[in-house]
Amino acid sequence: MSKPTIADLPERYRLQIARQLAQAKRPKTIAREPDPAPDPKVKRAFDRAEVFLRALEVRGLPRPEREHKFDAKRRWRFDYAWPERMVALEVEGGVWTGGRHTRGSGFVRDMEKYNRAAVLGWRLLRVTPDKLVSAGTFEMLREIFGLRESDAAWSDSQRAVISPLR
């Protein structure tokens, strides 16, 4: 059995409802400025990059340059770079969602960028966003910089500061 509708009511009730609806006050629309387009440079509540930079500092690892342009002919940039050591770290997003880095043309352009970086002498590390602030990433950086745990000021108290972010 279907639910009754206004059409199922007797004529006099339908007319009464129609009058009431016509007399009902409608909420006024408030004119406001449209929301501006989101600015990717504006910090979000959780800024993974800032957490990463802080974690490097806590671990005694050198601070990188962000968005470092490494090729004079192209506009290519590394997400994080230590130019004095020719080390770069790229964060590859969209791995599981079919993002730009995993689709055909984006993958090929990334290969071109990474090959050029290798020709110029860069050592490139690649991580996914969820692995940026992880023990594995910091271990790779310590290793590539030739640091031991003791050199990187690694202690249990410092490990506790960052461990919830893994």
Image (tube, rainbow, N blue to C red):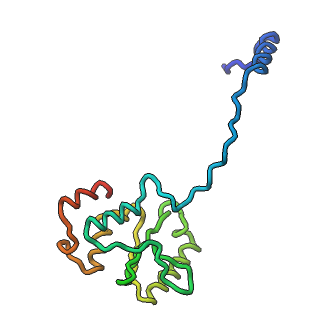
47 sits left or right of 105 in the view: left
45 vs 52, left or right, is right
Question: Seen in the image, is 48 located left or right of residue 158?
Answer: right
Instruction: Tell me what residue is drawn at x 40 percent, y 69 percent.
Output: 127
Query: Residue 130: which quarter of the image?
Result: bottom left
Query: Looking at the picture, how far across and down is residue 157, in whole percent?
Result: 19, 59
Q: Tell me if residue 121 comes above or below residue 129 in the rendering.
A: below
Res. 140 visible in picture? no
Residue 66 percent location from the top left of the image? 44, 72
Question: Which quadrant is the C terminus positioned in?
Answer: bottom left
Q: How many marks?
A: 0
Asked where in the image residue 54 lies, by quadrant, the reply is bottom left
Q: Position of residue 31 (x, y in %)?
A: 70, 40
Q: Nearer the viewer, residue 42 or 3?
A: 42
Identify the residue at image location x=44%, y=69%: 91
Front residue of this view, candidates 88 and 128: 88
Residue 81, placed above or below residue 162: below
Place of residue 17 in the rendered image (x, y in percent of width and height, measured from the top left): 76, 16
Compared across the picture, whether 25 is left or right of 71 comes to right
* Quarter the N terminus occupies: top right
Q: Residue at x 74, y 20 (%)?
A: 24
Taking the image as drawn, is residue 133 in sight?
A: yes
